[in-house]
Amino acid sequence: MRFKCTMGLRNTLIVMALLLSVSTVPFSGAASLKSHAFFNETGELPCYFPNTQNLSLDELVIFWQDQNKLVLYELFKGQEKPNNVHPKYIGRTSFDQDSWTLRLHNVQIKDTGSYQCFIHHRRSQGLVSIHQMSSDLIVLANFSQPEISLIANQTEKSNIINLTCSSTQGYPEPQRMYVHLNTTNSTSTYDAVMKKSQNNITELYNVSISVSFPIPPETNVTIFCALQLEPTKIILSQPYNIDAKSPVPSPPVPDHIFWIAALLVTVVVCGTVFLTLKKRKKKQPGPSNECEIIKVEEKESEQTEKRVELQEPERSDEVQCDVNISKTASDNKSATDF
């Protein structure tokens, strides 16, 4: 029992010595390799050991550490040593002996950074470093497809449209978010200040913009929301279509409005005709006036004739009386002569 404890302590001291030694020795070989991994998936940390001497794992000590010198994985003479692994990496790694690659599972944004692998050969004189390599792990999270939400539709009097565009659970922070407007004859782009929030635990981003812009009512409109992650990488939303406005029909006019309108027209026409005739009468007598004058003259003529008939007997008596007087005078004159 005491022997096992002594062996375990010895192995731990060996690994610690290796860590101290490699921290002061510069890395050899080419520049760091870049490896990409997606959030909650598996990332690869290559070591690419050529093994020209065809060494077995029993002769080697292999381990990986992060940029903070925390051990991810250790293989000591063909046996895994989880006791030397930092708690944040326990149960998250697996070693591929064929490709000399360490796989890091359930990758988080916090795992972004530099990693190094070290391979030592166990010889009679002790451990000798025969290979080391550095790699950079870049963790990405795919943003959701942008979604367009209408805040308030355009009113009858205004063609201004208000909308928001949002995308969630992505990393790293996107470069730009904007709205693209397509019509039959034109295209327009509308930018806005991108609002962003980052989760304290996952470190993922949620982004959104709010935009207001006019749309032509006489043509069909297609709107896209674009999220630009890189200069050449853009995620588009589903198209949001707005159909052209049809002409608004006039409301039906009630029947009594027609009757009132007809009555008003009749009154206006009759009044106009009456005023026109009245003006014409003042200027010159028309046929109706001539008829009235003729009737008045005929009536006066009849009255005159009646007066003449009434006066004629009186005049005859006067004449007869005058005749008698003249005869008497004549007779008297004759008698005097005799």
Image (cartoon, rainbow, N blue to C red):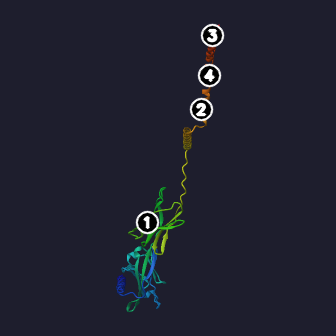
Q: For residue 209, which numbered disc appears in the image?
A: 1
Secondary element type, mark 1 = strand
Q: Quadrant of residue 197?
A: bottom left
* Residue 153 appears in view: no
Type of the residue with mark 4: Val
Which of the two marks, 4 or 1, is nearer to us in this view?
4
The quarter in which the N terminus is drawn is: bottom left
- Closest to the observer: 262 or 95? 262
Query: Which one is earlier in the sequence, the residue at label 1 or at label 2?
Result: 1
Q: Height in image: 321 above or below 143?
A: above
- Percent from the top left, x then y, of residue 224? 50, 66
Which of the two marks, 4 or 3, is nearer to us in this view?
3
Q: Which residue is mark 4?
A: 308
Query: Which one is earlier in the sequence, the residue at label 3 or at label 1?
Result: 1
- Closest to the observer: 14 or 326? 326
Query: Which one is earlier in the sequence, the residue at label 3 or at label 2?
Result: 2
Query: Left or right: where does residue 236 sit relative to residue 318?
Result: left
Query: Left or right: where does residue 76 sit relative to residue 291?
Result: left
Q: Quadrant of residue 105?
A: bottom left
Q: Which residue is mark 2?
A: 293
Q: For residue 333, which numbered disc appears in the image?
A: 3
